[in-house]
Amino acid sequence: MSERTNEQWVADLHGAPGVQAQALEDLRMRLQRSILYYLSHERSDLASRSSQELSQMADDLAQDATLRVMENLSTFRGDSRFTTWANKIAVRLAISELRRVRHKDFSLDDMTADGDLQIENTTVSALNGTTPPDPERATERAEVLQKIDQALSEVLTPRQYQALVAIAMRDIPMDVVAEQMGSNRNALYKLLHDARRKLRLYLESQDLPIDYMLELFH
């Protein structure tokens, strides 16, 4: 595989058909190796997959990653090695695709019951992992969580609730949520912005500023 400087990579990927084809194949092979390493060594959830399966996954993702690099080629500024920059794009794409596949069976309908919002212990789960509080602090946390759950169910519209809980608390990819809502990323960004603003204003009206809650659950 040819070694190129940053300038040579960019020039070859913009080059004549024969030169570009070779550069694209070299890039694809590099990205395939990086993705395969990521899948094999940094994803414990894929430990049960055979080497052949992982290799096939890496091949498929490398094709998409090569296209993604080409789409973003004009943004490369040379602050790092070209291959380092391209590998980051490839790994981010792999992470996004694995999240999408993991949540492919997710349904927004599971978050409602008979048309009403179905509040679960989502907020509690999102704040787990903190140091066990003393009894007084535990009581204070429980009261705050109750107000947050009340805000989620009473202040937000059903669509705002579904979007905010799915994306911010359940880590569902935005594209998956947008598709199920019959929406797009821009509209979903606006929906989330409005939902967060509503929550913030409501919680502040309940004497629950963000700084206080962050300190309480630290």
Image (spheres, rainbow, N blue to C red):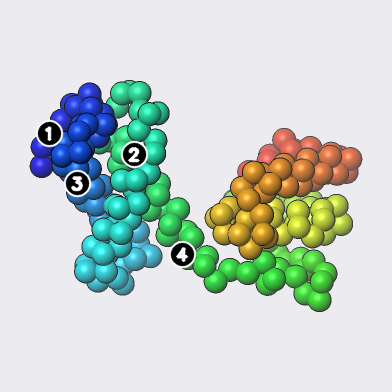
Between discs 1 and 4, the one toward the N terminus: 1
Mark 3 neighbour class, 10 Å CA radius: few under 14, some 14 to 19, many 20 or more: some
Q: Given the image, on which type of amino acid does mark 3 rest? A: Glu
- Image x and y of residue 209, in percent: 79, 37
- Image x and y of residue 154, in percent: 87, 57
Between discs 2 and 1, the one toward the N terminus: 1
State the residue at coordinates (67%, 66%).
108
Mark 2, mark 1: which one is toward the viewer? 2
Dot 1 corresponds to which residue? 3
Tell me, yes or no, whether the two marked residues, 2 and 1, touch with CB atoms within 8 Å: no
- Image x and y of residue 38, in percent: 30, 53
**Quadrant housing the N terminus:** top left
- Please tell me which residue lies in front, 36 or 177: 177
Dot 3 corresponds to which residue? 25
State the residue at coordinates (28%, 58%).
58
What numbered label is drawn on residue 70?
A: 2
Mark 4, mark 3: which one is toward the viewer? 3
What numbered label is drawn on residue 101?
A: 4
